[in-house]
Amino acid sequence: MKKAVFFKAVLSLFVLFGMILFPGCKNRESEKAEKASETGASIVVFIPGVMAGSPIYEMLAEGIKKAAEDFAASNQGAAPSVTVIEGGFNQAEWESQVTTLAASASYDLIVSSNPSLPDIVSSVSTKFPKQKFLLLDGELEGNPNVYTLRYNQREQAYMAGYIAALASLEAIGAEPGAKRIGLVAAQEYPVMNNVILPGYIEGALAVDPGFSVDFRVVGNWFDAAKAAELAAGMIRGGVKVLLPIAGGAGAGVVQAASEADAKVVWFDTNGYAIRPGTVIGSTILRQDKAAYEKTTLYLKGALPFGKAEIAGMAQGFVDFVEDDPLYISSVNPSLREKQAALVASLRSGKLKLD
């Protein structure tokens, strides 16, 4: 009996020394479980493209990270983990990449932002019904595992068309010729064809009913040379102001406009510093604000999955940058005054564009 007690004591000492001398032998699954309990949630941000040179995606990631940090601080706990993964420019690969993320079962929430993501997620969610998704700049209603927020891009495009027409009239002056503004898009997709392009035309017609829009498509989101070629042809055809919605390819439009003394209206982010004097208007999306608020709701267990919401100027998610010194120095006061009146009417709700 004494011998059995002795052996038990020796065995206990060996276990104790082993835990002290070899902490790496601790069960790895236990470590994972402890880490998960510390963070409380694991979020992955899928970038449909690359972060570099894409402020709209940088804002997405920054908003989510800030939400995780603030949530942890307010709850006096570790921050939920946030992983950012770039999908690259090949859109054909995005669905398989999102599928891989869902299949890994490593993330409580997958977040992304692009009008094409709702269709992809609709397909992926049928295979992985427990996976939750938060999608910005897209729309999918009725899926119990998906929440979407679509920006009111009719308002955004309307403001772009309005200032483009004002600047075109100023450039045309007494010259004869057609009243025409340009739009260079990366691709055609439902929001572009049904919301942005009509809203852009609508804004121009509010300035002068004689305006039309020259609409061209690059075919991808990165070919700046092709975009520059399209823009140069439009300018030769009499276009004085262009709106690029083409991702990285938009740089080609700015270059062509700068070389021909034409002007550019920027979309989604503040673009005045891209080419001062050439960019004469910027309509923006508050992607960081949306990402922060909706991620915070998720962490609080209050994000309404299954809903597809739309938000615009009244909610502070869409706006026009009119206080930038480069805008003030590049655009004459009378034009800025007219644009300011339009922006004020949209912010106040006096002018409503559903």
Image (cartoon, rainbow, N blue to C red):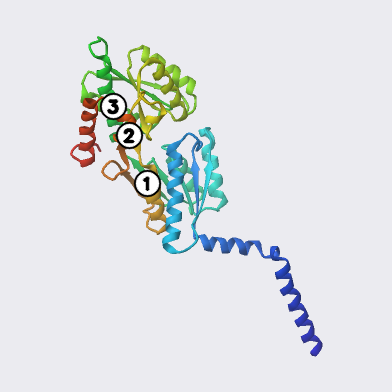
Q: Quadrant of the C terminus?
A: top left
Depicted 68 relative to depicted 164: above or below: below
Name the residue: 41% across, 23% down.
Answer: 254
Q: Earlier in the sequence, mark 3 or mark 1?
A: 3
As measured in the structure, the alpha-carbon distance from the residue carrying label 1 to the one carrying label 2 is 22 Å
Q: In the rendered image, which quarter is residue 337 located in?
A: top left
Residue corresponding to mark 1:
290
- What's the mark number on residue 324? 2
Q: Label 2 sits on what residue type?
A: Asp
Q: Earlier in the sequence, mark 1 or mark 2?
A: 1
Residue corresponding to mark 3:
161
Q: Label 3 sits on what residue type?
A: Gly
Q: Secondary structure at mark 3?
A: helix
Q: Quadrant of the N terminus?
A: bottom right
Q: Label 1 sits on what residue type?
A: Ala
Q: Is residue 112 visible to us here?
A: yes
Q: Give the foreground label among 2 and 3.
A: 2
Q: Secondary structure at mark 1?
A: helix
Bin the neighbour count of mark 2 within 10 Å (Cα to Cα): few under 14, some 14-19, many 20 and up: few
Viewer-side residue, 144 vs 232: 232
Q: In the rendered image, which quarter is residue 330 located in?
A: top left
Bin the neighbour count of mark 3 within 10 Å (Cα to Cα): few under 14, some 14-19, many 20 and up: many
Viewer-side residue, 189 vs 295: 295
x%, y% of residue 113? 43, 41
Q: How many marks?
A: 3
x%, y% of residue 11? 76, 78
Q: Earlier in the sequence, mark 2 or mark 3?
A: 3
